[in-house]
Image (cartoon, grey):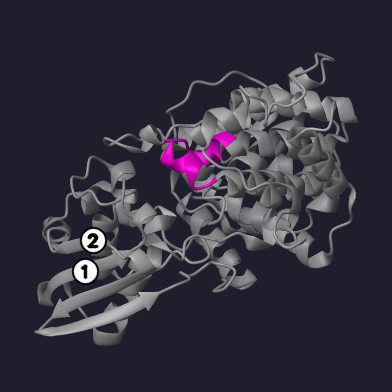
């Protein structure tokens, strides 16, 4: 392959996969795995009976059955994103864990793979997914593409390539195949659609397909990213080659992710957190709230300002709904998006008092900060709170203990016995020596 932007990127990813991560990076990857499994178990519970499956050798997480690696990757990816609590990265504007780990579980179950290789696959998959996303955002989003589906496809495929120790020419073909499959439309978020998680499941399944095809010996084009009809030309406006080739100041991208405490789109989290802080500080209740003004960055508004709620998927994307739920309930968990809450007349009335405005100064801070300023008029007083880094960002992190507590609460909600939940968690945190045991527990 001639020296192209594609070759340069793949050379960097192969070198990255070959290096030995330190203990902190390894711990981060294991926490990502545990967080992923908690989300997937509850997602499986909430989508129980929705999917037809065939027999196979890959666990369908939380469903006590197995299927083919393609079907399992698809369904596990959907499950992991279904409750909107999976991890993400603000520069890339995507969710790396759901496609990467779902695809790797399929590959690890079907091919010979040890725990160390699996861990390498997670770390490499996150790196590739996040670098690709950060290099093309926000232009990719503005064109209507969902980066978790597109960049997640390519990143997950490279995660598997790294885990399986594929040859250089196989990496190249795998990546070309994945780039051709790389898509995901943000239209699937609109009009009450519940298909947003499909973008993630499809990415995981497509990554598996790309690996199968790439190992066949078929060759791809020389520059699937930078060619005149390549991925960049088709799907973004500008490319930050430095971010693509050098990542985040020479560090590991997996250390730059956020973890979600609220079961809504991340663009709503700064506003949610501002409301929660004011609620606690001033003991606010809906009846005393005359208005809620949210000033935030432009990208957080389009697609998230609606007050007509057409189901749980629509509510999770709605900033007015999410802040109204935060004010009433004092939390924004997956239960705030069930049927009873969606039909709550008090929340519906509160939404009518929410005003959202773009603040040019906050827009100029993106992606370094994705902030919101919340002002609540109550009893004639205006109460304000600014949130620059909502909970879970690297600058405002959650602890390992909080991640475990979140995992256990999700497993409890999925109806998993605590003893089994603890065993799965222990296996995830020691995956380098217990991969087969972990897969057997899923």
Q: Mark 1 packing: few (<14 Cα in 10 Å), some, or many (20+)?
A: some
Could you tell whether 248 is left or right of 349 in the image? right
* Segment tinted magenta in the rendering: 137-150
Q: SS at mark 2?
A: strand
Q: SS at mark 1?
A: strand
As for residue 144 lying within the magenta part, the answer is yes
Q: Position of residue 242 (x, y in %)?
A: 70, 51
Location of residue 215 with respect to 77 vertically, above or below: above
The circle drawn on residue 293 is: 1
Location of residue 175 with respect to 44 vertically, above or below: above
The answer to whether residue 73 shows anywhere in this view is no
In the image, what residue occupies the spot 51% across and 60% down?
A: 367
Q: Position of residue 45 (x, y in %)?
A: 46, 42
Q: Position of residue 326 (x, y in %)?
A: 29, 66
Task: Please name the residue that numbered disc 2 is placed on.
Answer: 356
Could you tell whether 392 is left or right of 159 in the image? left
In the image, what residue occupies the spot 58% across and 58% down?
A: 418
Question: Do tag 1 and tag 2 residues touch (Cβ < 8 Å)?
Answer: yes
Q: How many marks?
A: 2
In the image, what residue occupies the spot 43% across and 56% down?
A: 266
């Amino acid at each position: 392959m001639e020296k192209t932007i594609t070759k340069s990127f793949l050379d960097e990813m192969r070198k990255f996969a070959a290096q030995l991560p330190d203990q902190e990076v390894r711990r981060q990857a294991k926490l990502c795995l545990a967080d992923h499994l908690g989300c997937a178990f509850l997602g499986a519970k909430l989508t129980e009976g929705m999917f037809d499956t065939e027999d196979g050798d890959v666990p369908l997480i939380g469903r006590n059955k197995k299927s083919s690696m393609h079907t399992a990757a698809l369904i596990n990816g959907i499950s992991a994103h279904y409750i909107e609590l999976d991890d993400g990265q603000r520069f890339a504007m995507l969710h790396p864990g759901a496609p990467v780990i779902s695809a790797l579980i399929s590959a690890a179950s079907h091919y010979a793979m040890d725990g160390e290789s699996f861990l390498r696959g997670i770390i490499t998959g996150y790196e590739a997914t996040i670098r690709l996303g950060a290099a093309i955002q926000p232009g990719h989003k503005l064109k209507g593409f969902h980066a978790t589906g597109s960049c997640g496809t390519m990143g997950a495929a490279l995660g598997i390539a790294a885990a399986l120790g594929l040859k250089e020419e196989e990496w190249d073909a795998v990546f070309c195949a994945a780039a051709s499959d790389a898509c995901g439309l943000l239209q699937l978020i609109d009009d009450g659609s519940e298909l947003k998680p499909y973008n993630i499941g499809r990415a995981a399944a497509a990554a598996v397909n790309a690996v199968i095809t790439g190992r066949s010996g078929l060759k791809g084009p020389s520059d699937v990213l930078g060619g005149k009809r390549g991925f960049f030309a088709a799907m973004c406006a500008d490319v930050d080659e430095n971010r693509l080739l050098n990542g985040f100041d020479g560090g590991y991208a997996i250390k730059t992710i956020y973890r979600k405490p609220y079961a809504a789109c991340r663009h709503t989290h700064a506003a949610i957190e501002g409301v929660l802080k004011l609620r606690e500080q001033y003991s606010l209740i809906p009846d005393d709230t005359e208005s809620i003004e949210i000033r935030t960055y432009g990208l957080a508004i389009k697609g998230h300002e609606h007050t007509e709620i057409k189901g749980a998927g629509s509510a999770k994307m709605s900033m007015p709904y999410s802040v109204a739920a935060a004010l009433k309930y004092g939390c924004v968990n997956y239960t705030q998006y069930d049927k009873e809450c969606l039909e709550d007349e008090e929340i519906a009335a509160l939404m009518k008092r929410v005003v959202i405005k773009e603040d040019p100064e906050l827009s100029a801070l993106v992606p370094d900060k994705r902030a919101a300023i919340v002002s609540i008029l109550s009893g004639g007083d205006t109460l304000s709170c600014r949130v620059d880094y909502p909970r879970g960002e690297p600058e405002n992190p959650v602890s390992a203990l909080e991640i475990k507590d979140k995992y256990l609460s999700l497993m409890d909600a999925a109806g998993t016995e605590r003893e089994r939940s603890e065993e799965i968690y222990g296996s995830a945190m020691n995956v380098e020596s217990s991969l087969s045991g972990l897969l057997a527990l899923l």
